[in-house]
Amino acid sequence: MRVVLAEDLFLLRQGLIQLLDAYGFETVAAVDNGPDLLEAAARHRPDILIVDVRLPPTFTTEGLKAALQARREIPKLPILVLSQHVEQMYARELLADGTGGIGYLLKDSVFDNEQFIDAIRRVAAGGTAMDPAVVSQLMVSHARDQPLGALTARERNVLELMAEGCSNTAIAQRLFITEGAAAKHISNIFVKLQLPPDSDSNRRVLAVLAYLNA
């Protein structure tokens, strides 16, 4: 899997390159600013971008803006944001096209290699990988949204875990319910969000995006 990495801190950038290499990824470009990220994405057409939000020169939202521009130029380009900050407006814009292949992890919440690598693989495959803190911030204003307002409290809990990228088994374990109950909740969510019959993986992505981007 070919990766373009954008991270301004030298030691972290080099550490990520070594970690990716250890798990069989190929870092085709590692840059420290937005313009170089755009150039690398256009030249290499990678399988995924891994992007810090804040890059030179202003260290505000250059990385996320560049990622959004890259996705406009390369539709459905998978993007995993890795940051210390939640930028709600740009995170919503990143989710806006509804095609999946999006992740947003907070650096302080990545505790082991497997967690990070699993997120990369899920996003590259068209899924989602959202940090719980990011999900919580994006959901704050959605309590009254329709048809989201039709979801029960338990269904909202299930959908939040789906946004994090949890499988049915993981959802059941986190909520102390059976896998059958988790599957039933997910089925109800699909119906209430009026998602057409499709593969479960596609509908999971659509459900998550409908929830976070409403």
Image (cartoon, rainbow, N blue to C red):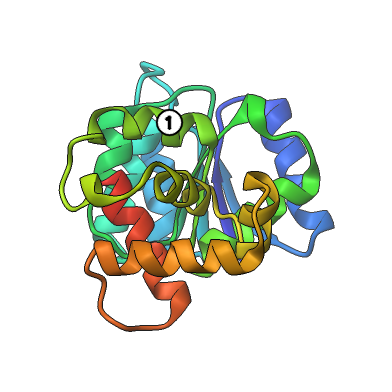
Q: Residues within 10 Å of mark 1 (few under 14, many from 20)?
A: few
Q: Residue at x 31, y 29 (%)?
A: 88
Q: Quadrant of the N terminus?
A: bottom right
Give above or below for 120 relative to 34: below
| Residue type pointed to by label 1 | Ser
Question: Image quadrant of residue 27?
Answer: bottom right
Residue 145, percent from left and from top: 17, 42
Which residue position holds label 1?
136
* Residue at the bottom extreme, as displayed: 198
Residue at disc 1, secondary structure: helix
Give the residue at the far right of this rendering: 22
- Can residue 1 be seen in this snapshot? no
Q: Position of residue 109 (x, y in %)?
A: 65, 30
| Residue in the foreground of this view, choosing between 46 and 196 | 196
**Rendered residue at 50%/64% (across/down):** 46
Res 99 → quadrant:
bottom left
Q: Is residue 191 above or below residue 69?
A: below
Q: Residue at x 70, y 30 (%)?
A: 12
Residue at 31% from the left image edge and 27% from the top image edge = 140
Q: Is residue 19 above or below residue 98?
A: above
